[in-house]
Image (cartoon, coloured by chain):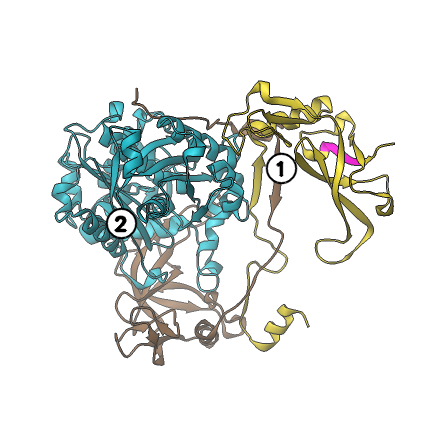
Chain colours: A brown, B yellow, C cyan
């Protein structure tokens, strides 16, 4: 059936063999937690999200307005120049209708699918977008190019996180 | 002030890898492998410790390995050797702290026990650290058969030869 | 730079759950590669090995752990790692060891054991996303593939059926690959009717999760000519990485791959790759990715790829056979090892030793590609006889 390929080993096991104890296994899990400093650019980005606004950085050399903000332009390789607010409206650049959770488990029956999207924000340069999720929309009606608007958590519930925007909805 | 408290005080923007108390819920499951399966089976079923001996390189690997790492010979059935359950204490240390830094109720002794040309790490019990000497002989103490599951901890601990 | 040849290749069978430890998998592949060219470990001067995130095998500093299984005991040994691009990148890395004149022989070994991650390797992919601006949304890897596929199809009006045709073509090649995880024929309908996971990605649009290892032996010209009458030369290598701000670019076209491919083609003296390349092994963790990468590799004009696919241009007996190995989609996807399968495939194909998968017409030049990280990295190797 084949040529001269040398194939050694690769002994396949069934799921039950590793569960019934006939194949010896050990289990271990990472027992620690990380804390991250958000840094200069993302620190300000999060503070502004808490205020109900989205902020980016502008580079005077390539004229791009960058979101999420960073203090340097990776294309021009120089410190960029100023803070610029962008709008909380934008255009769906691409999306998915996802029936799988983050750990590959399937969503519960009756649970609506996850609706991740890349949203190009109004006021930022074309093709500059962020990843977020869509809501208040029939999944089958989502189209690339659809206009969407951020739905914010109430001010008192915001913590300075990307999740201060609950989702984006069509408008 | 701990590092985390310090950065939390100085900046408002600290992010954790999980919600408080909810660790990253992915677990690793390790098979013992082709050689490891047989190695552990001998411990579990027969209270025996096996190595594999490469006669060309004159090395006895403990725990048993599938291959000689020096010449890449495959260790077949005839290479398996019973190295006995008595080893020599190559080195040891005494642990006074748990891994989170809190003091242990009773300090524990961890030994590096030479069997064949390899070292097994295991607990040393039935002895105080003061009575231990590098080079002394130690014996494996196995758990009762019903409690063994095919694991290095089917050997409960090692103790100095009586 | 000196000429460098591939003189041997070997691999384990790819399986969903392997009994072997990661070291043992590496040993089996390495032993097979040495046996294929009748070499001994003592003939090897250095080792270049590749493995993707430590998280999958669940072994921190996996490079050091794997080294003795890769034949690295008491030898200069170096690991490379750039996610999915590792399997071809490790060969670029090994190529340098020999081309530079430092060494005459080099083992390149790539391994991954995905089944150690419980309940599923997918869980660890959460950690590749930005820890502050993306991870709180609990994304999984399917999200970004699905969104790239959606954008790609939208850009040219390609359909899910078009993508499934590519998937079936590649998967079925694997039926003739002795290491393959896939053992049953898959039809376009099977793919289109499989479980929707993340629209537009369905279950059979995706490669299986696998354990496995692959190794190849590299040699300088003088050693290669002594060892074999049929050395396969590494004619060019290239690699490139784009920004990790993956939402700040258009995903429909992998520009970084174009740059990597041009680097390799320039080195190989190739001006018109679509006319000169006889075999392509684009990276194919998802069926659309193979087509996306054929465009990036300059082997198909942007937007015309589906037309060529439907005309049989990429069939085994077509102009540029695509993934004759069976690819990640069929042979399986132990991340780093999956890329090296493509190098091994060009080795077999260019020597005329690929059995039922053999591309007809005496192929002379092939290209292998692997892709990875956050929609941003590509590594390319051009091989010829």
Please report the bounds of the magenta region as a residue range.
B154-158
Residue A26, label in figure? 1
Above or below: residue C130 compared with residue C95? below
Q: Chain of mark 1?
A: A
A158 or C51, which is in the foreground?
Answer: C51
Residue in the foreground of this view, choosing between C148 and C175: C175
The image quarter in which residue C194 lies: top left
The answer to whether residue B111 is left or right of residue B26 is right
Tell me which secondary structure the magenta stretch mostly adopts. Answer: strand
Q: Is residue C266 left or right of residue A102?
A: left
Between the residue at mark 2 and the residue at mark 1, the CA separation in whole angstroms equals 47 Å
Can the viewer see residue A88? Answer: yes
State the quadrant of the C terminus of chain A: bottom left
Left or right position of B39 against A67: right
Give whichever of C215, A74 is nearer the camera: C215
Q: Position of residue C138 (x, y in %)?
A: 47, 55
């Amino acid at each position: 059936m084949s040529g001269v390929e040398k194939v050694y080993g690769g002994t396949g096991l069934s799921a039950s063999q590793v569960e019934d104890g006939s194949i010896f296994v050990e289990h271990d899990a990472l027992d620690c937690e990380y804390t991250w400093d958000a840094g200069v650019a993302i620190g300000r980005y999060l503070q502004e999200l808490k205020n109900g606004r989205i902020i980016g950085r502008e580079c005077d050399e390539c004229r791009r307005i960058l979101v999420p903000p960073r203090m340097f332009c990776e294309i021009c390789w120089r410190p960029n120049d100023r803070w610029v607010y962008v709008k909380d409206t934008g255009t769906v650049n691409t999306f998915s209708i996802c029936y799988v959770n983050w750990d590959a488990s399937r969503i519960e029956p009756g649970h609506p699918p996850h609706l991740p999207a890349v949203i190009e924000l109004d006021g930022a340069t074309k093709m500059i977008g962020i990843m977020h999720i869509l809501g208040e929309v029939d999944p089958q009606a989502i189209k690339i190019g659809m206009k969407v608007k951020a739905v914010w958590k109430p001010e008192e519930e915001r913590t300075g996180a990307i999740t201060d925007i609950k989702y984006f909805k069509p408008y | 002030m701990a590092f985390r408290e310090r950065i939390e005080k100085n900046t408002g923007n600290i992010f954790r890898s999980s919600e408080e108390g909810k660790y990253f819920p992915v677990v690793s499951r390790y098979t013992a492998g082709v050689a490891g399966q047989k190695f552990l089976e001998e411990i579990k079923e027969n209270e025996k410790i096996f190595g594999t001996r490469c006669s060309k390189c004159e090395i006895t690997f403990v725990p048993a390995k599938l291959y000689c790492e020096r010449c890449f010979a495959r260790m077949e059935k005839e290479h398996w050797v019973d190295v006995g359950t008595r080893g020599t204490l190559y080195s040891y240390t005494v642990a006074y702290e748990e891994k989170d830094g809190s003091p242990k109720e009773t300090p524990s002794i961890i030994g590096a026990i030479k069997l064949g040309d390899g070292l097994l790490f295991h607990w040393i019990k039935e002895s105080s650290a003061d009575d231990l000497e590098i080079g002394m002989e130690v014996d494996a103490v196995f758990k009762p058969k019903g409690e063994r599951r095919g694991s290095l901890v089917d050997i409960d601990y090692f103790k100095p030869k009586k | 730079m000196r000429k460098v040849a591939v003189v041997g290749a070997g691999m384990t069978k790819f399986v969903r759950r392997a009994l072997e430890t990661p070291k043992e998998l590496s040993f089996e592949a390495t032993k097979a590669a040495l046996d294929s060219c009748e070499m001994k470990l003592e003939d090897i001067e250095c080792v270049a090995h590749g493995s993707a995130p430590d998280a999958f095998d669940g072994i921190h500093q996996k490079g050091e752990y794997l080294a003795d299984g890769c034949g690295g005991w008491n030898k200069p040994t170096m690991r490379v790692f750039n996610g999915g691009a590792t399997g071809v990148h490790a060969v670029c890395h090994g190529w340098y060891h020999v081309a530079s004149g430092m060494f005459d022989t080099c083992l390149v070994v790539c391994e991954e054991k995905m089944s150690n991650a419980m309940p599923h390797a997918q869980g660890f992919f959460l950690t590749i996303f930005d820890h502050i601006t993306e991870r709180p949304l609990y994304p999984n890897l399917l999200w970004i593939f699905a969104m790239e596929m959606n954008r790609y199809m939208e850009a040219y009006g390609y359909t899910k059926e078009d993508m499934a045709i590519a998937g079936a073509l590649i998967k079925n090649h694997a039926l003739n690959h002795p290491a393959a995880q896939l053992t049953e024929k898959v039809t376009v309908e099977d793919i289109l009717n499989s479980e929707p996971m993340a629209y537009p990605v369905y279950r059979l649009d995706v490669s299986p999760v696998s354990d496995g290892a692959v190794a190849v032996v590299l040699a300088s010209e003088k050693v290669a000519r002594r060892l074999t009458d049929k050395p396969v030369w590494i004619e060019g290598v290239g690699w490139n990485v784009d920004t990790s701000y993956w939402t700040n670019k258009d995903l429909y076209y992998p520009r970084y791959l174009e740059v990597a491919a041009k680097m390799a083609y320039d080195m190989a003296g190739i001006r018109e790759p679509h006319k000169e390349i006889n075999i392509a092994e684009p990276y194919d963790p998802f069926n659309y990715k193979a087509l996306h990468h054929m465009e990036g590799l300059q082997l198909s004009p942007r937007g015309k790829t589906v037309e060529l696919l439907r005309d049989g241009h990429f069939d085994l007996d077509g102009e540029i056979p695509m993934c004759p190995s069976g690819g990640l989609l069929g042979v399986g996807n132990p991340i780093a090892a999956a890329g090296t399968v493509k190098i091994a495939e060009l080795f077999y194909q260019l020597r005329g030793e690929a059995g039922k998968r053999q591309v007809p017409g005496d192929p002379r030049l092939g290209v292998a590609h692997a892709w990875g990280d956050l929609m941003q990295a590509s590594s390319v190797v051009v091989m010829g006889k």
